[in-house]
Amino acid sequence: MDVVEINELTKIYDNRLVALNTVSLKLPQGAIMGLIGPNGAGKSTALMLILGLQKPTAGSVSVFGQPMALSSGDLRSRIGFLPQSGSYPPDMTCITYLDQVGKLFGIPHELRKKRLSSLLHATELLQASSQRIDHLSSGQRTRLGIAAALINDPDLLILDEPTVGLDPEGRAFTISLISELRRNGKTIILSTHILPDADQVCDYVAVLNQGKLIFSGPVEDMKKIAYLNTVDLTVAGEGIDIAIEALEVTEPDTHFERLGAETVRVAFQQQGDFSGPLANVLLEFSRCGVTLRAIRQVGELEDAFLKRLSEDRLRGFSRAIGVENGLANLLAQTQGTSS
Amino acid sequence: MTTDINEAVREATQTLRPAGTARKRSIAAFFSLLQYDLSILWRSWVIRFWFLLTIIGAVTAVLLARTYSDQTSFFISWALVLYTGLGSFVALIVSASAISAERPFLGVAVISRGIAPTPYLLAKLFSRSFTVLGMFLIVMVPTMFIVRTQGLENDMTTSGMLLALSYWSLMLAVLVFLGITFSVLFTNTLLGVTVLGVFWYMGLLLLAATYAGDLTADGVLGGLPLVLQGESRMIEVSTIAIIGGIPLLVLPFLATRIVNSRDM
């Protein structure tokens, strides 16, 4: 069963701003979906619509097989949500806040206390449990938000930018927490623009740009979009340029690009196995006295994302040009007819 | 450290689900929101200050009643009119800011926690009405009974006093319900409070002008002293009950409809 099913979802604010444009998505049970896109792409709007906190202009959202609306409190009781800019009552302590959230979910007293203690431990907030929320660091607040999102033992967890503003340790902690939740079978939607985070934990990605869905599918499929047969070589030595010149003659189907003093991007024309040409390249570098320090496949999620984004922008531009040409042709035809 | 986290997360997420139906959860959420809102109101400086002011006013009224030569029903009528003039302002702020002030975080911090807007709205209606009426009755009931015993010329009956208190409670409840509805209608708190303030005080002035027996100070009190004297007719009581009861029945539905039609 799909936990979330979005059909041709459109959201237009005040008849002016198109925040989402006919987006369709499905999220299977137990999967983690990364909702990625630049700022203003429509990620938060999509999450608000999934939670039923906003009404779609067109299209529909189903969660756990039932239509989601503002009145669907019962459906929301199975969802845990970490908002991007968590608004916490500043005068509450961690423990009173989590207790309050537990009460809102209608969790019985005994169970609430047990959960509270486990979650404070899990999010390493035990020491800070009696501290006022306005005295917490941003990392601690994020962890408090995650604890609040987990207090109802949700079947679906929605995390809006959980790693933004965290130091590397806090980020690693949050990622490890999400990985652990995945192992516990939780279905998670993770909205982020920090792509390595999505790469680490997500099974699926949905890429939004200017309210449009420009990709949705498994992370591996997304990565295939980007430079499948391209590697970045980190090299050192005097003979880099000589080696490249020689290789351009012996390997005419291979494209070389200097990205920096020590990085050379090598793009092979050959699809599939390119171990042969790669071996030739490495041999030539070695012959010219160039030391190989690292090989990195250009096929990270970030590369794929950027490529997809640039393709989408180009398509948008082409469409605009097309429309302009079309209008010009139409105008010419009209003028021809009238004369 | 990672193992600890893993174990704790597993433990935290594998405990039993809360038992109970959707209705039970909804009722629990209602009481939780009610309790939370009451605690906010109890900590409010506006409420504390107003409560202190009314206690001082009540003590002053009791002291003045000993020297007031006219009938006590007129004295208490003036006290009620004064309470309406000033107390309405507090009730208006307390109710008209109830939801609009929370709007920036209402969706993500409250409604997203398994809450439907209806229990939230009902909790607001109950807590704000309870606070406004509670503050009124706690001060006015003892004041009226003490004034009756202390006044030089008592003409008030117990039934008349209870009826007057009921009228005033009904009026304040209507104001709170109106305020909550305005709070849903206007996302800007200041605008909501201002519009309701103009609407309410204009209404009070029109009411006073309509029911004033003559243009003397006591004439403006209309039939209120008679109510306190127990001279009310059944037809008047039922008319006021219906006029006051209709908004109490209609406004919650209207507010629920508005809140459900808007984005959080």
Image (cartoon, rainbow, N blue to C red):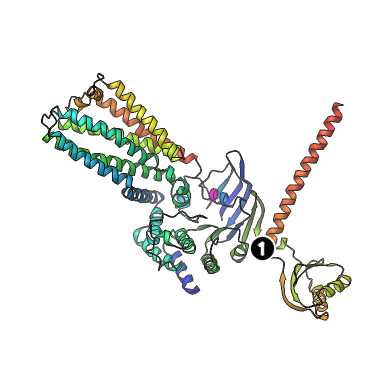
Q: Give me the residue at 85% from left, 26% from top.
A: A338
Count of numbered tags: 1
Q: Give me the residue at 49% from left, 70% from top.
A: B6
- Viewer-side residue, B45 vs A339: B45
Residue range (magenta)? A47-56
Residue with the most extreme right position: A249
Q: Identify the main secondary structure in magenta.
A: loop
Q: Give me the residue at 44% from left, 55% from top.
A: A88
x and y percentages locating residue A163 in the rendered image: 55, 62
Chain of the residue on which disc 1 is drawn: A
Residue A27 appears left or right of B206: right
- Disc 1 target residue: A301
x and y percentages locating residue B19 in the rendered image: 39, 57
Q: Is residue A105 above or below residue A121?
A: above
x and y percentages locating residue A242 in the rendered image: 85, 75
Residue A186 appears left or right of A298: left
Give amino acid for label 1: Leu
Q: Is residue A170 above or below residue A55?
A: below
Disc 1 residue crowd, few under 14, some 14–19, many 20+, Cα 10 Å? many
Membership of A50 in magenta stretch: yes
- Viewer-side residue, B187 vs A115: B187
x and y percentages locating residue A159 in the rendered image: 53, 58
Membership of A49 in magenta stretch: yes
Q: Give me the residue at 42% from left, 59% from top.
A: A133
Can residue A227 be spotted in the picture?
yes
